[in-house]
Image: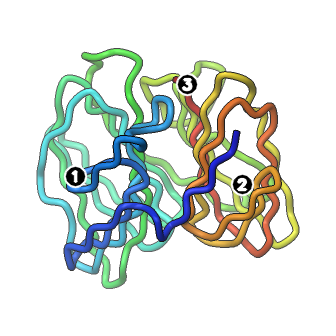
């Protein structure tokens, strides 16, 4: 099962400093048919103007992954963590029993990012934060795990969820495959580039909801950068 969700049909909220697109119900956007996809609860496509951002606010019991594809975001939290995540890199915040954080674009250019929330495997984990660079060259032509809740995925950012977050970069004409399997839920978005996913064509920033497919086969119709979440019901 593959469902194309065109960017133009998603939820939008323009706050001036923040131009947000919601793939699932979030904030003032509510669609009872789009409350999540498996254990993926939120996928926000955020554009943050220079010298602006999210002031300190709390979260709990949610795995929050930020994938920056243009510019940079600077994180600070109540645990004392402080870090800057730039284009191509990923940060993970496990909200657990509670954490307060801020996310600011301190750059002189616009920042574009995907903010992804995944439901944890249980409530009450200890809160944590981590970030790391993932050079694009390592993802060229293949899916690479960026964050995972599975022990077999070594050298990745850890999340407390039965899910993986993966990325790949493809040049025009390249194909990458990912083994998904039955009873798995995948959601795929390209930050740039036209794609064909198991025969379904999609543009940059469209959402592609996938379920019960043995293989996810992605062909770039032009140079593309792609993020995929593989989760469970």
**Which mark, by number, is residue 232?**
3
Of circles 2 and 3, the one toward us is: 3
Establish if 102 lies above or below 41.
Answer: below
**1 or 2: tag closer to the N-terminus:** 1
State the CA–CA distance, disc 1 to disc 2. 33 Å
Dot 1 falls on a residue whose secondary structure is: loop
**2 or 3: tag closer to the N-terminus:** 2
User: For the point 81% across and 37% down, which residue is it?
Assistant: 215
**Which mark, by number, is residue 27?**
1
- Measured as percent of width and height from the top left, residue 7 is found at 50, 67
In the orientation shown, which residue stands out farthest toward the bottom? Answer: 108
**Which mark, by number, is residue 139?**
2
Along the horizontal axis of the image, is 118 left or right of 48? right
State the CA–CA distance, disc 1 to disc 3. 24 Å
| Quadrant in the rendering for residue 50 | bottom left
**1 or 3: tag closer to the N-terminus:** 1
User: For the point 31% across and 77% down, which residue is it?
Assistant: 107
- Measured as percent of width and height from the top left, residue 74 is found at 29, 61
Establish if 155 lies above or below 4.
Answer: above
Dot 3 falls on a residue whose secondary structure is: loop
- Measured as percent of width and height from the top left, residue 210 is found at 65, 41
State the CA–CA distance, disc 2 to disc 3. 24 Å
Tag 1 and tag 2, C-beta contact below 8 Å: no
One can see residue 166 in this view: yes
């Amino acid at each position: 099962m593959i469902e194309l969700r065109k960017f133009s049909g998603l939820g939008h909220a323009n706050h001036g400093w923040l131009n947000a697109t919601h793939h699932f119900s979030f904030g003032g956007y509510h669609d009872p048919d789009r409350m999540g996809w498996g254990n993926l609860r939120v996928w926000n496509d955020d554009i943050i103007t220079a010298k602006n951002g999210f002031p300190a606010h709390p979260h709990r019991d949610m795995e929050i992954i930020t994938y920056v594809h243009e510019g940079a975001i600077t994180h600070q939290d109540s645990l004392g963590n402080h870090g800057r995540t730039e284009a191509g890199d990923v940060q993970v915040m496990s909200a657990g029993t509670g954490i307060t954080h801020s996310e600011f674009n301190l750059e002189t250019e616009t920042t574009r990012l995907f903010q992804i929330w995944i439901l944890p495997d249980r409530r009450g984990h200890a809160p944590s934060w981590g970030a790391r660079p993932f050079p694009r060259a390592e993802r060229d032509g293949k899916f690479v795990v960026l964050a995972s809740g599975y022990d077999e995925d070594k050298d990745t950012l850890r999340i407390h969820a039965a899910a993986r977050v993966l990325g790949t970069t493809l040049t025009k004409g390249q194909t990458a495959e990912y083994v998904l399997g039955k009873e798995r839920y995948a959601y795929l978005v390209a930050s740039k580039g036209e794609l064909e996913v198991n025969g379904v064509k999609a543009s940059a920033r469209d959402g592609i909801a996938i379920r019960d497919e043995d293989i996810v086969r992605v062909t770039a119709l032009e140079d593309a950068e792609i993020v995929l979440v593989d989760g469970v019901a």
